[in-house]
Amino acid sequence: MPIIEFSDVTKTFTTQQGRVVALDSVDLAIEQGEIFGVIGYSGAGKSTLVRLINGLERATSGRIVVDGVDISSIPEARIRPLRARIGMIFQQFNLFRSRTVAGNVAFPLRVAGWPKAKRDARVAELLHFVGLLEKAHSYPDQLSGGQKQRVGIARALATSPRILLADESTSSLDPETTQDVLALLRKVNRELGVTIVVITHEMDVVRSIADRVAVLDAGRIVEQGTVFDVFSAPRSETARRFVSTVLHDQPTAGDLERLQEAHAGRIVTARVEDGSRVGSVLSDAGRHGVRFEIVFGGISSLQERSFGSLTIELLGPDEGVDAVVAELAAVTEVVERRGVARELEEVPA
Amino acid sequence: MNEGWIWDRHTPLALEALGQTLYMVAATLLIGGVLGLVLGLALYVTRAGSVLPNRYVFGVLNVAVNIVRPIPFVILLVAVAPLTTLLVGKFIGTTAAIVPLAIATAFGFSRIVEQNLVTIEPGVIEAARASGAGPWRIIATLLIPEALGPLLLGFTFVFVAVIDMSAVAGIVGGGGIGDFALVYGHQRWNQEVVWIAVGVIIVLVQLVQFTGNTLARKALRR
Ligand SMILES: Nc1ncnc2c1ncn2[C@@H]1O[C@H](COP(=O)(O)OP(=O)(O)O)[C@@H](O)[C@H]1O
Ligand SMILES: [Mg+2]
């Protein structure tokens, strides 16, 4: 059974300007123990989605079951104790400036009614886990961004939650600190078995820690699946644009026009994946009297698997080129790039 | 007939007046300060989107503050006379003056409290809610510490304003430094007495301001 399940969830806000549909018929199942990414542009509804999970926001319609409890049907006062089982971290860290690092981490424990001795021991244990034991008596204003987020993580984990919600938790950190915090989240997931929901507008974040991902666009989930499946073969425009932020392997219309002008041969784009054998096919192209040129492309990795594409110009006799394209198509996905075969006849090989 | 400061005559009178001022100011700040804090918290938490939103409570409090706050103190002093009589038994005297002083302070301070609480990042309150805290815990343990620096500065401002108002309280027989300056200085053409009284007030205000600034800085630094 999934640890978080949304069934046909819609959330609308009524503002002075009218009704805003923040989430539109969302279905989602997040499994126990995974790191689930939700990616989307600003205003897509990501924060709303994550705030529905711990009941900070209530659904307008639909059903939300979290850790076996249908939280969409119970009042706020009954959701409150459940929040000890769901930690949350934020983009702006949202630490209590009036409390020390230890005081911040102790807050959820006070709320949960832990006695002082137990509380102190737990705080020390958590600060050790995030590597900030020596900062216990510092105030948040004396910490760097990365340290603040570590405190945020320690506070969120205080009551040993089974779920951690991370809303743009690395978006205000520099790239290096981002990697440190992501590594810590991975450790939380692996060592403590905490299910993590990572909300982000950054492809790199999803790519480096998520197992599965949902792409959110204007309140709707347009694609979901494993990170590799969604981003190695994006079906939605939004997913494609996110992929292009880390891998610019597909020629744009402008690129294609330029390529067709510069190259006389037939142009095809072949998808490259681990074991797709595109290289072997190409190295054998000579047997058909065909020469090739790589004119565009890129290969990257996702979840420790390679993916990408190569755009290739094939030069040679018609039958030979056809044969090579057929061989390529037998091992991988091939896209013909417009208006080539006919031109090829006019150009002597 | 400018007789200047006659030590044996003016010093005990001035000390008595200073005692009355300190008594009025202290009692006012205690009563008005607590009431103002409660009223300010209530305004903040009942506002739409806050921790205990309640449009009716907010509406009533908001209108009450808007009505009472702009009333000039001299007029308020007279206007609340029936209430003063009810509470203190009389409407003249140092203790009686505390009633209008405390009312003016409570309403004035409430807005300052509310405005300072508004500066707390909404995310901080969200983090508390996400930790399982309910509205009463947030009110009791989080709001005031989080806004402590600006609140201390606001309280200092009110402190100085109360010293100012307490000088006017002489009108209802409240006594105090202001009354002393008026009766023994101004009305008897004794400019020296006036200046000394002014000097005492200045020292008092500076002392309060300095202490307030220091405490606020300490609260803000961390
Ligand atoms: N409390 C609110 N009141 C009114 N509109 C809101 C509120 N919260 C979010 N929205 C609207 O809902 C949409 C989704 O917002 P949000 O979930 O914050 O998006 P994201 O986190 O993806 O940037 C936006 O159009 C936003 O303006
Ligand atoms: Mg957001």
Image (tube, coloured by chain):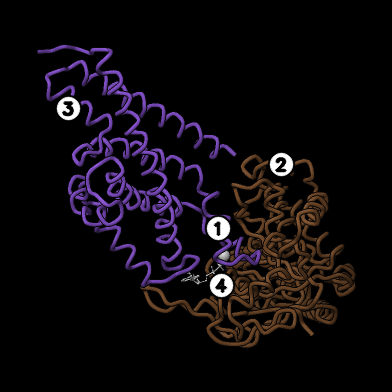
Q: Which mark is residue A265?
A: none
Residue A92 is situated, as x and y percent measured from the top left of the image, at 60, 54
Secondary structure found at label 1:
helix
- At a point 62% along the width and 68% down the height, the residue shown is A241
Q: Secondary structure at mark 3?
A: helix
Which residue in the structure is indicated by mark 4? Answer: A45
Q: Are marks 4 and 2 on the same chain?
A: yes
Q: Nearer the viewer, mark 4 or mark 1?
A: 1
Q: Is mark 4 within 8 Å of ligand 1?
A: yes
Rounded to the nearest angstrom, the CA distance separating label 4 from label 3 is 70 Å
Q: Residue at x 62, y 52 (%)?
A: A95
| Amino acid at pointer 3 | Val
Q: Residue A137 bears which disc, if any?
A: 2
Q: Crowdedness of circle 3 by 10 Å Cα count: few (<14), some, many (20+)?
A: some
For disc 1, the marked residue is B140
**Quarter that holds the C terminus of chain B:** top right
Q: Quadrant of residue B57?
A: bottom left
Quadrant in which the N terminus of chain B is drawn: top left
Left or right: residue B39 compared with residue B73:
right
Q: In terms of sequence position, does the residue under pointer 4 or pointer 2 come before the other? A: 4
Position of residue A31 in the picture relative to residue A11 (left or right)? right
Q: Which chain is purple?
A: B
- How far apart are the alpha carbons under marks 1 and 2? 23 Å
Query: Can you tell which of label 1 and label 3 is closer to the viewer?
Result: 3
Shown in brown, the chain is A
Q: Relative to residue B208, is residue A322 depicted above or below? A: below
* Closer to the eye: label 4 or 3: 3
Q: Is residue A231 left or right of residue A280?
A: left
Q: Which mark is residue B183?
A: 3
Seen from the viewer's position, the closer of residues B159 and A23 is B159
> Quick one: label 2, few (<14), some, or many (20+) residues within 10 Å?
few
- Residue A114: where, in percent of width, then height? 75, 61
